[in-house]
Image: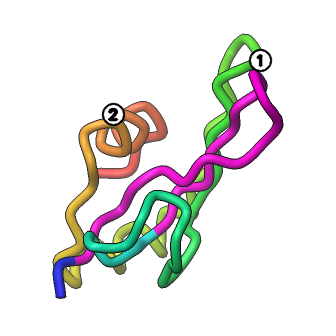
C-alpha cells in the first residue's frame, strides 16, 4: 500500500480550504483517510498554514510521500 500526504478540499464554493491528510494513493481526493495532520486556508492574506509537525515527521518516517503542493507547504511551515 502506497501512502501519500496530500490535500483534501473542504469549504464552500469559491472559498476553498484544505485539510492536509494521510491517505492511500488509490483513494479519491475526498475519500477515506488514514489521518489528518494539518490545515491550509489560502484565502486570507497571508495564507493560514497549520501543521502538526510531530505527526508529519511520524508519517514521513514511515515512508509516506508528500505531493508537490504539500511539500511546498511543509517548506513554508518549516517541517523538513
Image coords of residue 5 (percent x, y): 36, 62
The structure residue drawn at horizontal position 73% and vertical position 11%, both measured from the top left corner, is 45
The structure residue drawn at horizontal position 22% and vertical position 84%, both measured from the top left corner, is 62
User: Where is mark 2, residue-wise?
Assistant: 72
SS label for mark 2: helix
> Nearer the N terminus, badge 1 or badge 2?
1
The structure residue drawn at horizontal position 32% and vertical position 78%, both measured from the top left corner, is 24
Task: Point out the stretch of residues depicted in magenta.
Answer: 3-21
Q: Give neighbour class at mark 2: few <14, some 14-19, many 20+ (Cα, 10 Å).
A: few
Q: Nearer the viewer, residue 10 or 21?
A: 10
Image coords of residue 39 (percent x, y): 64, 50
The structure residue drawn at horizontal position 40% and vertical position 55%, both measured from the top left corner, is 6
Quarter of the rendering containing residue 30: bottom right
Residue 39 vs 54, above or below: the answer is above
Residue 8 vs 24, above or below: the answer is above
Does the segment drawn in magenta span residue 13?
yes
Quadrant location of the N terminus? bottom left
User: Where is mark 1, residue-wise?
Assistant: 44
Q: Nearer the viewer, residue 58 or 36?
A: 36
- The residue furthest top is 45
The dominant secondary structure in magenta is strand
Amino acid at each position: 500500500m502506497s501512502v501519500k500526504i496530500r490535500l483534501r478540499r473542504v469549504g464552500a464554493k469559491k472559498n476553498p480550504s484544505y485539510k492536509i491528510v494521510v491517505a492511500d494513493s488509490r483513494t479519491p481526493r475526498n475519500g477515506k483517510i488514514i489521518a489528518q495532520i494539518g490545515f491550509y486556508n489560502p484565502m486570507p492574506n497571508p495564507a493560514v498554514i497549520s501543521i502538526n509537525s510531530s505527526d508529519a515527521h511520524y508519517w514521513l518516517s514511515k515512508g509516506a510521500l508528500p505531493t508537490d503542493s504539500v511539500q511546498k507547504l511543509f517548506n513554508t511551515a518549516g517541517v523538513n
